[in-house]
Image (cartoon, rainbow, N blue to C red):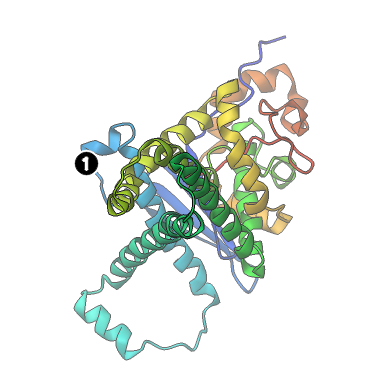
Amino acid sequence: MAKRKKKTCYSGIGGQAVLEGIMMKNKDKYAVAVRKPDGEIEVDIDEYSGSFKGLFLRKIPFFRGIFNFVDSLALGIKAINYSASFYEDEEEKETRFDKAMNKVFRGKTEKVLTGFVTLLSIALAVAVFILLPYYLTKLLSVNVRNETYTAFIEGGLRLAVFILYVLLISINKDIKRVYRYHGAEHKCINCIEHGKPLTVDNVMKSSRLHKRCGTSFMILVILISVILFFFIRVDSPLMRLVIRILLIPVIAGIAYEIIRFAGSCNNAFAKVLSIPGLLLQKITTKEPDERMVEVAIAAVEAVFDWKDFEHDNFAEKADANPEESNSSEGERVEVVLEDDNKSADGAGNP
């Protein structure tokens, strides 16, 4: 019997759920697949090298995470806008404001608006998850003189605000469908990275959780901020506020490196680091139906040759046991957490 080559292999692809669809990215190439109102799947393929292409800092650990986060956010917004365009009022006409914007920005209105929305999203995230817990802590700890207790209160509030936010938006029915497409995205990547043919049946059997996920990135950002703010203390209230804002790029850089490490390793330490994100993904991913999986597969196949990937990385595995490509999720490497009915070793792109 031939020696089994690998149980799992990093693919390098990542994605994001959008309105009734999936965006998948492989290197500079990305595709957005959307289930249109008439039931057909529309796939748009393009390239996105980022706003900071060529910058040497993009290749340096801890710095690269900052730029990758901003680029991922900008591309995500662009993909969401594209998917939403299929569900806009067909009779909607270009307004005077639209014409004026196109004239001012010489046809680059979409890029300008995407940049503005990206900056606004970052600013809102800072306000809600950094500044709000800080001011709430000041109100709740007026009579608390111990700085250690105050730091714990602020950290607990920051974590609570983030989890509450995730839970509240999950109530919306449109967000629930996005979460199901999010699950389809993860299942596709899991299927590929475990050497299984990318079929609807195999994808449906795969886990909806993955260590390289934006959800995992965000919860790590929150947890790392709690640790750093606990140890970095100053007396001035103004300086405490300034430090919290200035440390955001540092926190993002650290979180990115942790996600990168955990997503490419299967040792015990990587599994422990992945636990918070995998737990939160039980909220931000839901089980998709087969039609959603079809959309996810269309997005993957537009940017990634999974057959070549399977041959290059799992050929010996297939030779050793031809039936293994359809094996159950019980043979996965990651068994730290249990999904509702599958193992938890999930996927995604921070």
Question: What residue do we see at 68% from left, 10% from top?
Answer: 2
The three-letter code of the residue at mark 1 reads Leu
On the image, the x and y values in percent for residue 305 come to 52, 39
Q: Quadrant of the N terminus?
A: top right
Which quarter of the picture shows residue 9? Answer: top right
- SS for dot 1: loop
Residue carrying label 1: 55
Q: Position of residue 82 (x, y in %)?
A: 46, 67
Q: Which x, y percent locates residue 236?
A: 29, 49
- Residue 209 seen in the current view: no
204 horizontally vs 248: left or right: right
Residue 16 vs residue 274, the one in the foreground: 274
Above or below, 37 relative to 17 = below
**Nearer-the-camera pick, 241 or 196:** 241
At x 32%, y 38%, the residue is 64
Left or right relative to 115: residue 142: right
